[in-house]
Image (cartoon, rainbow, N blue to C red):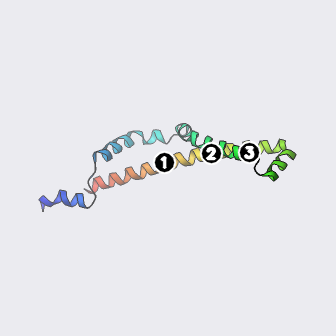
């Protein structure tokens, strides 16, 4: 049975590749640092800003005439609402995208640790 053990481990998917080992070392050292809020801001910020720019370009392009009429009538309050909405969109996208990525990496790390302990 000793001779079959490595083959059984490989067939069951319990063998850990060198890439997985490097990821485990990297994530063990950097997992708490990557969870910090300031780091999350500058990683997810480009995606959020691109989304807000696309929304503003769509809004101010004038393709929907009724929106243009409403915007002309209530210009002062609408600008404030748009700025607040843009800030909320940026904050949500930044925090959600980076936290989701962190959760995926943490789950992968925990699976690799369990796989390593099982083999």
Residue 13 screen position, x and y as percent: 28, 58
Q: Which residue is mark 3?
A: 61
Q: Residue furthest front?
A: 63
Where disc 2 sits, the SS reads helix
Q: Earlier in the sequence, mark 1 or mark 2?
A: 2
> Can you say which quadrant of the picture contains the N terminus?
bottom left
Residue of label 2: 51
Identify which residue is drawn at 66% across, 42% down.
53
Q: Which residue is mark 1?
A: 101
Q: Name which residue lies at 36% across and 54% down.
A: 111
Camera-side mark, 1 or 2: 2
Report if the CB atoms under discs 1 and 2 are less than 8 Å apart: no
Q: Mark 1 packing: few (<14 Cα in 10 Å), some, or many (20+)?
A: few
**Where is residue 15 drawn, in percent x and y?**
26, 54
Is 13 positioned to the left or the right of 72 in the image?
left
Image coordinates for residue 85, horizontal then vertical, percent: 71, 46
Q: Quadrant of the C terminus?
A: bottom left
Q: Which residue is located at x 52 percent, y 47 percent?
A: 99
Of the two numbered discs 2 and 3 on the same chain, state the one appearing first in sequence.
2
User: Closer to us: mark 3 or mark 1?
Assistant: 3
Q: Secondary structure at mark 1?
A: helix
User: Residue 26: which quarter of the image?
Assistant: top left
């Amino acid at each position: 049975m000793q001779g079959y053990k490595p083959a059984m481990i490989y067939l069951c998917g319990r063998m850990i590749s060198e890439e997985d080992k490097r990821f485990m070392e990297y994530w063990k050292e950097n997992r708490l640092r990557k969870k910090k809020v300031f780091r999350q801001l500058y990683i997810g910020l480009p995606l959020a800003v691109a989304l807000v720019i696309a929304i503003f370009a769509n809004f101010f392009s004038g393709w929907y005439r009724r929106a243009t009429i409403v915007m002309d009538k209530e210009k002062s309050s609408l600008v404030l609402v748009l700025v607040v909405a843009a800030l909320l969109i940026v904050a949500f996208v930044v925090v959600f995208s980076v936290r989701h990525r962190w959760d995926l990496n943490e789950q992968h790390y925990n699976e690799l640790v369990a796989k390593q302990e099982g083999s």
